[in-house]
Image (tube, grey):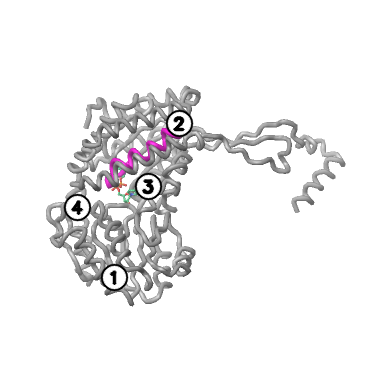
Amino acid sequence: MIDQPGTTAQRAATAFAAQAAGTAARRMSFGVAERRGALDRLAEAIRRNEAAVVAALATDFGKPEAEVILTELLPVMQELRHARRNLRRWMRPRRPLPTLATLGTSARIRPEARGVCLIIAPWNYPFSLCLGPLVSALAAGNSAILKPSEMTPATSALIARMMGEAFSPDLVTVVEGGVEASEALLALPFDHIFFTGSPAVGSIVMAAAAKTLASVTLELGGKSPTIVGSQADLTQAAKWITFGKFANAGQTCIAPDHVFVHRSVKDDFTAALRLRIAKSYGEAGASPHLAQIVSDRHAERLSGLLSDALSKGAQLTLGGEMQGRRMAPTLIEALTPEMRISSEEIFGPILPVIAYDDIAEVIAKINAGPKPLALYVFDKDRAGTERIIAATSSGSVGVNLTVAQFTHTGLPFGGVNHSGIGAAHGEYGFRAFSHERAILTNHGSALPLVFPPYTARVKRLIGLVKRFLG
Ligand code: NAD
């Protein structure tokens, strides 16, 4: 942790006061060129520190270098490039046409900075889920205080150092620490809070925001179901599910949590899955291509989830071993609702495979739980896939793929209710950090014709308009 004098509450208050003092001036001075300049400074800081990012994530949870580049550096670099290129267009006011009642006026919607923003990040992608939202915050003209996760201290310290070098604290600063730092920050009257983490903490954040009426974006989690239909390409399904589930050792918010597979293809699918897992991570389990579980506590939680399921009758069909904090890719079957793994977000490399006969049972199960962050469907039957999409709700859907929806800058990324509120990425991220201000200018509006006194002529006119609107 870099040196940050004072108590956590004092540090939070000082950081906030420094940014709040500049809000009014920033409204006038933080235009396209200045925002691009800030994005360039962030890009430059990332370029200069690439090796340090790889090292920090290796220290925090043994994440392989290729996975750090793929899932931590590239998403932020892509957001930066996309924002830089589209910033002018995003900032341009939109001009809706006048309506009958507002003939003789001109309307515009001007995206404006919200002001001072708080970004609270989780540990699972501690770099990209902290700096990705910062790209949107800066593009939208805000200042931001970042609160990285205390579970990944090397990455947290690195982000603090990088931001200290790239930005003046009245634009971007970092307050490190755990729950106490979050609580101290949440007590302050931020204009917007962008939180990524668990649904349980998400509701604490929303309750805190309710006190100051800060707007919120909540990027939460939950169990993302995956369906493998009878007409799926099983090799492709196994390839994508293996990547989506075991990248980052399953500690991915949009990882397939469990798989429903049509009974007619269950054995073939399981065989394809085992083959793909062996090809990706070897037979031994403790593969260098597999990240570690972030902490002993989380490793114990996963072992506990597995032993609870096995003690209640689940069958282990692959893996199960834990070497230090590295858990082998694990497959289990024969789940029942009493097992904790049936209701808790797994968030680790354990994949339950559940056979089904009728898709209606699967849809009913999905609809009985909280709305998932992601839903994946593997099938060549397009009409059947569309029926599943229409019958359910989730933050996003992947058809014949997993997790790649995160990387499309043109798609909103977010959940729905229990899995999140609001969206991130590209223009959606820009909008999350903007207030869309409505401006209506009078050039000769006809509205005064219906102002009081309500003479017979005025009443006739009101009646005419009423008839016209039906
Ligand atoms: P978490 O909710 O425990 O912590 C997230 C952040 O909140 C951390 O910075 C932490 O310090 C802070 N925090 C923890 N307890 C708090 C409290 N009582 N009050 C205020 N702040 C508090 O989440 P996590 O364990 O870091 O991440 C895993 C969860 O995040 C999973 O549920 C996962 O699905 C979800 N997630 C969602 C997304 C997404 O984009 N939707 C991305 C990654 C992770």
**Residue identifier under label 4:** 289
Instruction: Between label 1 and label 2, give the one nearer the viewer.
Output: 1
Label 3 neighbour load within 10 Å: few <14, some 14-19, many 20+:
many
Residue type, mark 3 in image: Gly
Judged by depth in the image, the label closer to the viewer, 4 or 3, is 4
Q: What stretch is highlighted in magenta?
A: 121-139
Image quarter of the N terminus: top left
Estimate how packed mark 2 is, as few (under 14), some (14 to 19) or many (20 or more) residues with alpha carbons within 10 Å. Answer: many
| SS of the residue under disc 3 | helix
Quarter residue 356 falls in: bottom left
Residue under pointer 3 = 202
For the question of whether residue 104 can be seen, the reply is: yes
Q: Distance between the residues labelled 1 and 4?
A: 23 Å
Residue that carries the numbered disc 2 in the rendered image: 141
Distance CA(mark 2)–CA(mark 3): 25 Å
For disc 4, the neighbor class at 10 Å (few under 14, some 14 to 19, many from 20) is: many
